[in-house]
Image (cartoon, grey):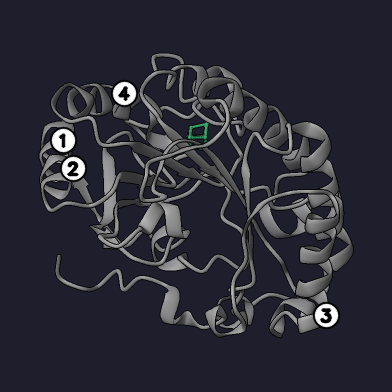
Amino acid sequence: MADGCRQCPRNCGTDRKQACGFCGMPKDIWISRCAPHLWEEPPISGTRGSGTVFFTGCNLKCVFCQNAEISRDHLGEAITPEALTERMLSLAKEGVHNLNLVTATHYTESLIPVLKAVRAQTDIPIVWNSSGYESVAVLRRLEGLVDIYLPDFKYIASELSSAYSAAPDYAEVASDALTEMYRQTGSPVFDRDGIMRRGMIVRHLVLPGCRKDSIEVVRHLARLLPTDGFKLSLMRQYTPEFALHTPYKNLHRRVTDFEYTSVVEEALRLGLDGYTQGKDSATSHFTPDFHEKQ
Ligand code: SF4
């Protein structure tokens, strides 16, 4: 990063030895939680959990973020690449189905040697779990190191991505990123127990008052990628508690049955396959406790 950091599409060029850019983090890797997690999609969590590493800070910082304690308030601690490698290998030894790097985009360069070291010692699948706001050039550096991509595709309308994530170019950037992810992994591959070994699951969180944009997201994904080239995870776990400070009144309530069901119906009509969530998922119970001792 001699010329400043350009690891994400913010491209802000910050010298992270001296200051923090939009992502809010210095050059050192910071993590907030490293533990098995049972609340990912079924082929990721399986029966033994996904070995999640939650990274501190975020390059998107959505106003409704359910993990604001770590993305915006930076709860976490610095860790060396060597110590992180050990933590990941020890998670793998616990029997989790995969190692799941959550919101790691702003540390990609520092994580490449970590992923190489982990891969040299275990064949457990590596999951790259991200907002979808990634640059293709940086994603190419992960080729051969990541088995499963788990990106979001959050919005089509620039008005929404500007207002909620300060990223007017989100749809365009995420489209290119998902195309590159699909190029690297190909279509989903599962083991005999239904656990994912390779491929991509695209997540979309249905937001209150944004039903039409969600339907456009689903249509866009069906045009962007082969319908059997990815699984779609339609999430209804949006909880307003994290957005009550914002001026966006629509974000101060939960998603209605009509809003969620109409997006699911459009996905089914388009022949997309994947995962849905029940109404009981819309609770902060599904947000990990980042204060818990690990
Ligand atoms: S990762 Fe952070 S510092 Fe680097 S370009 Fe993105 S926002 Fe800027």
Mark drawn on residue 112: 4
Q: Amino acid at mark 3?
A: Phe
Mark drawn on residue 258: 3
Residue 82 in percent (x, y) is at 12, 32
Q: Residues within 10 Å of mark 1 (few under 14, many from 20)?
A: many
Q: Amino acid at mark 1?
A: Thr
| Residue lying at the far top of the rendered structure | 2
Helix, strand or loop at label 2? It is: helix
Gap between marks 4 and 1 measured at Cα: 11 Å
Nearer to us in this view, 2 or 233 = 233
Q: Residue at x 47, y 66 (%)?
A: 68
Q: Amino acid at mark 2?
A: Met
Helix, strand or loop at label 3? It is: helix
| Residue lying at the far front of the rendered structure | 192
Mark drawn on residue 88: 2
Gap between marks 2 and 1 measured at Cα: 5 Å
